[in-house]
Amino acid sequence: MHRISVNGMQVDVVRKDIRNLHLGVYPPEGRVRVAAPLRVDDEAVRLAVITKLPWIKRQQTRFRTQERQSPREYTYRETHYFLGRRYLLNVIEHPGPSRVEVRGKAGIDLYVPAGSDAVRREQVMLKWYRKELKALIPPLIDTWQETLGVTVDDWGVKKMKTKWGSCNIEARRIWLNLELAKKPAQCLEYVVVHEMVHLLERNHTDRFRELMDRFMPQWRHYRDVLNQAPLSHETWCY
Protein backbone atom coordinates (compact mmCIF):
# COMPACT_ATOMS: atom_id res chain seq x y z
CA MET A 1 0.00 0.00 0.00
CA HIS A 2 1.16 3.53 -0.71
CA ARG A 3 -0.36 7.00 -0.48
CA ILE A 4 -1.06 9.66 -3.08
CA SER A 5 -2.38 13.21 -2.74
CA VAL A 6 -5.51 14.32 -4.59
CA ASN A 7 -6.48 17.98 -4.23
CA GLY A 8 -4.73 18.06 -0.86
CA MET A 9 -6.49 14.89 0.33
CA GLN A 10 -4.46 11.81 1.25
CA VAL A 11 -5.60 8.61 -0.48
CA ASP A 12 -4.39 5.09 0.38
CA VAL A 13 -3.87 2.97 -2.74
CA VAL A 14 -3.73 -0.84 -2.67
CA ARG A 15 -3.12 -2.79 -5.88
CA LYS A 16 -4.75 -6.19 -6.21
CA ASP A 17 -5.42 -8.80 -8.85
CA ILE A 18 -8.93 -7.48 -9.53
CA ARG A 19 -10.76 -6.25 -12.63
CA ASN A 20 -12.35 -3.05 -11.38
CA LEU A 21 -11.29 -0.12 -9.21
CA HIS A 22 -13.05 0.16 -5.84
CA LEU A 23 -13.14 3.35 -3.77
CA GLY A 24 -14.13 3.47 -0.11
CA VAL A 25 -14.48 6.11 2.61
CA TYR A 26 -14.12 4.84 6.18
CA PRO A 27 -14.99 6.16 9.65
CA PRO A 28 -14.30 7.72 12.00
CA GLU A 29 -12.60 10.56 10.10
CA GLY A 30 -13.36 9.65 6.49
CA ARG A 31 -10.15 7.92 5.43
CA VAL A 32 -10.12 7.34 1.65
CA ARG A 33 -8.85 4.03 0.26
CA VAL A 34 -8.73 2.79 -3.32
CA ALA A 35 -8.28 -0.85 -4.34
CA ALA A 36 -6.95 -0.70 -7.90
CA PRO A 37 -6.19 -3.37 -10.51
CA LEU A 38 -2.50 -4.07 -11.03
CA ARG A 39 -2.51 -2.48 -14.48
CA VAL A 40 -3.97 0.88 -13.28
CA ASP A 41 -1.36 3.57 -12.60
CA ASP A 42 -1.52 6.35 -9.99
CA GLU A 43 -2.65 8.97 -12.49
CA ALA A 44 -5.69 6.89 -13.40
CA VAL A 45 -6.45 6.41 -9.70
CA ARG A 46 -6.12 10.16 -9.15
CA LEU A 47 -8.60 10.90 -11.96
CA ALA A 48 -11.06 8.35 -10.59
CA VAL A 49 -10.91 9.95 -7.14
CA ILE A 50 -11.44 13.43 -8.61
CA THR A 51 -14.65 12.29 -10.33
CA LYS A 52 -15.93 11.07 -6.95
CA LEU A 53 -14.90 14.07 -4.85
CA PRO A 54 -18.46 15.34 -4.13
CA TRP A 55 -19.50 11.87 -2.94
CA ILE A 56 -16.32 11.51 -0.86
CA LYS A 57 -16.95 14.87 0.84
CA ARG A 58 -20.53 13.87 1.67
CA GLN A 59 -19.38 10.60 3.24
CA GLN A 60 -16.68 12.34 5.26
CA THR A 61 -19.17 14.90 6.56
CA ARG A 62 -21.59 12.12 7.55
CA PHE A 63 -18.93 10.24 9.49
CA ARG A 64 -17.61 13.31 11.28
CA THR A 65 -21.06 14.41 12.42
CA GLN A 66 -22.36 10.97 13.34
CA GLU A 67 -23.57 10.60 16.89
CA ARG A 68 -21.29 8.57 19.15
CA GLN A 69 -21.60 7.60 22.76
CA SER A 70 -19.11 9.05 25.18
CA PRO A 71 -16.94 6.50 27.04
CA ARG A 72 -19.09 4.57 29.51
CA GLU A 73 -18.60 5.11 33.24
CA TYR A 74 -20.85 2.23 34.41
CA THR A 75 -22.93 4.34 36.73
CA TYR A 76 -26.57 4.14 37.81
CA ARG A 77 -29.09 4.72 34.96
CA GLU A 78 -26.38 5.00 32.34
CA THR A 79 -27.45 3.83 28.87
CA HIS A 80 -26.15 0.50 27.59
CA TYR A 81 -27.16 -1.62 24.60
CA PHE A 82 -27.68 -5.34 24.17
CA LEU A 83 -28.82 -7.00 20.92
CA GLY A 84 -30.04 -3.70 19.57
CA ARG A 85 -32.13 -2.70 22.58
CA ARG A 86 -31.47 0.23 24.88
CA TYR A 87 -31.22 -0.49 28.62
CA LEU A 88 -30.62 1.57 31.76
CA LEU A 89 -27.92 0.25 34.05
CA ASN A 90 -28.70 -0.55 37.68
CA VAL A 91 -25.52 -1.00 39.74
CA ILE A 92 -26.01 -3.28 42.74
CA GLU A 93 -23.20 -3.62 45.28
CA HIS A 94 -23.25 -6.99 47.01
CA PRO A 95 -20.80 -9.46 48.62
CA GLY A 96 -21.37 -12.33 46.17
CA PRO A 97 -19.89 -13.07 42.74
CA SER A 98 -20.07 -10.35 40.10
CA ARG A 99 -22.70 -10.93 37.45
CA VAL A 100 -25.02 -9.24 34.94
CA GLU A 101 -28.76 -9.85 34.50
CA VAL A 102 -31.20 -8.37 32.02
CA ARG A 103 -34.29 -7.17 33.87
CA GLY A 104 -37.39 -6.98 31.70
CA LYS A 105 -37.24 -4.82 28.58
CA ALA A 106 -35.57 -1.76 30.05
CA GLY A 107 -32.99 -2.63 32.69
CA ILE A 108 -29.64 -4.34 33.13
CA ASP A 109 -28.58 -5.20 36.69
CA LEU A 110 -24.84 -5.14 37.30
CA TYR A 111 -23.86 -6.92 40.53
CA VAL A 112 -20.39 -5.93 41.77
CA PRO A 113 -18.47 -5.79 45.07
CA ALA A 114 -18.82 -2.64 47.15
CA GLY A 115 -16.36 0.06 46.14
CA SER A 116 -15.67 -1.36 42.68
CA ASP A 117 -14.46 1.25 40.21
CA ALA A 118 -15.36 1.81 36.54
CA VAL A 119 -12.56 -0.47 35.34
CA ARG A 120 -13.82 -3.40 37.37
CA ARG A 121 -17.42 -2.79 36.33
CA GLU A 122 -16.42 -2.65 32.68
CA GLN A 123 -14.58 -5.97 33.01
CA VAL A 124 -17.71 -7.61 34.37
CA MET A 125 -19.86 -6.18 31.58
CA LEU A 126 -17.41 -7.19 28.84
CA LYS A 127 -17.16 -10.72 30.21
CA TRP A 128 -20.95 -10.96 30.10
CA TYR A 129 -21.15 -9.54 26.57
CA ARG A 130 -18.55 -12.07 25.42
CA LYS A 131 -20.44 -15.00 26.98
CA GLU A 132 -23.74 -13.94 25.42
CA LEU A 133 -22.20 -13.36 22.00
CA LYS A 134 -20.37 -16.69 22.01
CA ALA A 135 -23.65 -18.48 22.66
CA LEU A 136 -25.21 -16.93 19.54
CA ILE A 137 -22.45 -17.61 17.04
CA PRO A 138 -22.23 -21.45 16.69
CA PRO A 139 -25.81 -21.95 15.42
CA LEU A 140 -25.25 -19.22 12.81
CA ILE A 141 -22.02 -20.80 11.59
CA ASP A 142 -23.64 -24.25 11.44
CA THR A 143 -26.56 -22.95 9.39
CA TRP A 144 -24.50 -20.93 6.95
CA GLN A 145 -21.83 -23.60 6.46
CA GLU A 146 -24.56 -25.76 4.95
CA THR A 147 -26.04 -22.91 2.92
CA LEU A 148 -22.75 -21.61 1.55
CA GLY A 149 -21.03 -24.96 1.20
CA VAL A 150 -17.95 -23.86 3.16
CA THR A 151 -16.33 -24.97 6.41
CA VAL A 152 -15.17 -22.72 9.25
CA ASP A 153 -12.38 -24.46 11.14
CA ASP A 154 -12.14 -21.94 13.97
CA TRP A 155 -13.74 -18.74 15.18
CA GLY A 156 -13.33 -16.26 18.01
CA VAL A 157 -14.50 -13.01 19.59
CA LYS A 158 -12.24 -10.07 20.32
CA LYS A 159 -12.28 -6.29 20.56
CA MET A 160 -11.47 -4.73 17.20
CA LYS A 161 -11.05 -1.01 16.51
CA THR A 162 -11.54 -0.81 12.74
CA LYS A 163 -13.64 -3.81 11.67
CA TRP A 164 -16.77 -5.69 12.64
CA GLY A 165 -15.14 -8.94 11.61
CA SER A 166 -12.23 -10.53 9.79
CA CYS A 167 -11.44 -13.79 8.01
CA ASN A 168 -8.16 -15.68 7.77
CA ILE A 169 -8.63 -17.57 4.49
CA GLU A 170 -5.72 -19.98 4.93
CA ALA A 171 -6.67 -20.98 8.50
CA ARG A 172 -10.41 -20.81 7.68
CA ARG A 173 -10.83 -18.81 10.88
CA ILE A 174 -13.20 -15.90 11.44
CA TRP A 175 -13.02 -13.24 14.16
CA LEU A 176 -16.04 -11.25 15.32
CA ASN A 177 -16.03 -7.92 17.12
CA LEU A 178 -17.17 -8.01 20.74
CA GLU A 179 -19.21 -4.85 20.09
CA LEU A 180 -21.63 -6.96 18.00
CA ALA A 181 -23.25 -8.01 21.29
CA LYS A 182 -24.76 -4.51 21.36
CA LYS A 183 -26.21 -4.71 17.84
CA PRO A 184 -29.42 -6.40 16.55
CA ALA A 185 -29.16 -10.14 15.96
CA GLN A 186 -29.63 -9.65 12.21
CA CYS A 187 -26.48 -7.55 12.16
CA LEU A 188 -24.48 -10.30 13.85
CA GLU A 189 -25.76 -12.77 11.28
CA TYR A 190 -24.81 -10.41 8.46
CA VAL A 191 -21.23 -10.12 9.73
CA VAL A 192 -20.95 -13.91 10.11
CA VAL A 193 -22.16 -14.38 6.52
CA HIS A 194 -19.91 -11.58 5.24
CA GLU A 195 -16.83 -13.24 6.70
CA MET A 196 -17.84 -16.71 5.58
CA VAL A 197 -18.41 -15.52 2.01
CA HIS A 198 -14.74 -14.52 2.02
CA LEU A 199 -14.03 -18.26 2.02
CA LEU A 200 -15.60 -18.25 -1.45
CA GLU A 201 -14.16 -14.90 -2.61
CA ARG A 202 -11.14 -13.40 -0.87
CA ASN A 203 -11.64 -9.72 -1.78
CA HIS A 204 -14.57 -7.31 -1.96
CA THR A 205 -14.94 -7.82 -5.68
CA ASP A 206 -18.01 -7.76 -7.90
CA ARG A 207 -18.24 -11.53 -7.41
CA PHE A 208 -18.22 -11.04 -3.62
CA ARG A 209 -21.18 -8.67 -3.86
CA GLU A 210 -22.96 -11.03 -6.23
CA LEU A 211 -22.57 -13.84 -3.72
CA MET A 212 -23.89 -11.65 -0.92
CA ASP A 213 -26.86 -10.67 -3.07
CA ARG A 214 -27.59 -14.33 -3.79
CA PHE A 215 -27.37 -15.66 -0.25
CA MET A 216 -28.49 -12.61 1.77
CA PRO A 217 -30.43 -10.16 -0.43
CA GLN A 218 -30.99 -7.73 2.47
CA TRP A 219 -27.31 -7.48 3.40
CA ARG A 220 -27.01 -3.78 2.49
CA HIS A 221 -29.85 -2.92 4.87
CA TYR A 222 -28.20 -4.89 7.69
CA ARG A 223 -24.88 -3.15 6.95
CA ASP A 224 -26.56 0.25 7.22
CA VAL A 225 -28.24 -0.66 10.52
CA LEU A 226 -24.91 -1.94 11.81
CA ASN A 227 -23.17 1.36 11.15
CA GLN A 228 -25.97 3.58 12.46
CA ALA A 229 -25.74 5.57 15.65
CA PRO A 230 -25.44 5.20 18.50
CA LEU A 231 -21.91 3.92 17.97
CA SER A 232 -19.22 3.51 20.55
CA HIS A 233 -16.77 6.37 20.98
CA GLU A 234 -14.49 4.07 18.95
CA THR A 235 -16.11 3.43 15.59
CA TRP A 236 -16.31 0.23 13.57
CA CYS A 237 -17.35 -0.10 9.94
CA TYR A 238 -17.89 -2.21 6.88
Image (spheres, grey):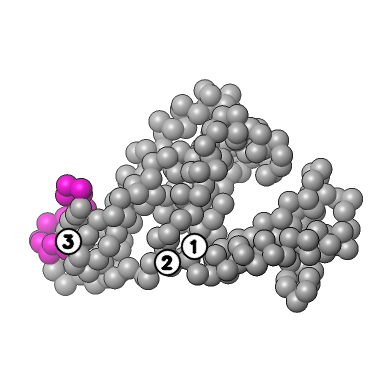
Q: Which residues are magenta?
A: 90-105
Q: Nearer the viewer, mark 1 or mark 2?
A: 2
Mark closer to the chain start, 1 or 3: 3
Q: CA distance from mark 3 to mark 2?
A: 22 Å
Where disc 1 sits, the SS reads loop
Q: CA distance from mark 1 to mark 3?
A: 26 Å
Q: Which amino acid, by three-letter code, is at mark 1? A: Thr
Is residue 175 visible in this depiction of the protein? no
Tag 1–tag 2 contact (CB < 8 Å)? yes
Q: Which mark, by number, is residue 68? A: 2
Mark closer to the chain start, 1 or 2: 2
Residue 84, placed above or below residue 45: above
The image position of residue 183, as x and y in percent, is: 39, 49
Residue lying at 35% horizontally and 49% vertically, measured from the top left: 84
Count the numbered circles shown.
3
Q: Which mark, by number, is residue 235? A: 1
Q: Nearer the viewer, residue 179 or 154?
A: 179
The image position of residue 39, as x and y in percent, is: 89, 50
Q: CA distance from mark 1 to mark 2?
A: 8 Å
Where disc 2 sits, the SS reads loop
Is residue 100 found inside the magenta-colored segment of the image?
Answer: yes
Residue 235, placed above or below residue 203: below
Q: Which amino acid, by three-letter code, is at mark 3? A: Asn
Q: Which amino acid, by three-letter code, is at mark 2? A: Arg
The image position of residue 5, as x and y in percent, is: 78, 72
Where disc 3 sits, the SS reads strand
The image position of residue 169, as x and y in percent, is: 64, 40
Q: Which mark, by number, is residue 90? A: 3
Which quadrant: the N terminus?
Answer: bottom right
**Badge 3: residue crowd in 10 Å (few <14, some 14–19, many ≥20):** many
Q: Nearer the viewer, mark 3 or mark 2?
A: 2
Is residue 27 visible in this depiction of the protein? yes
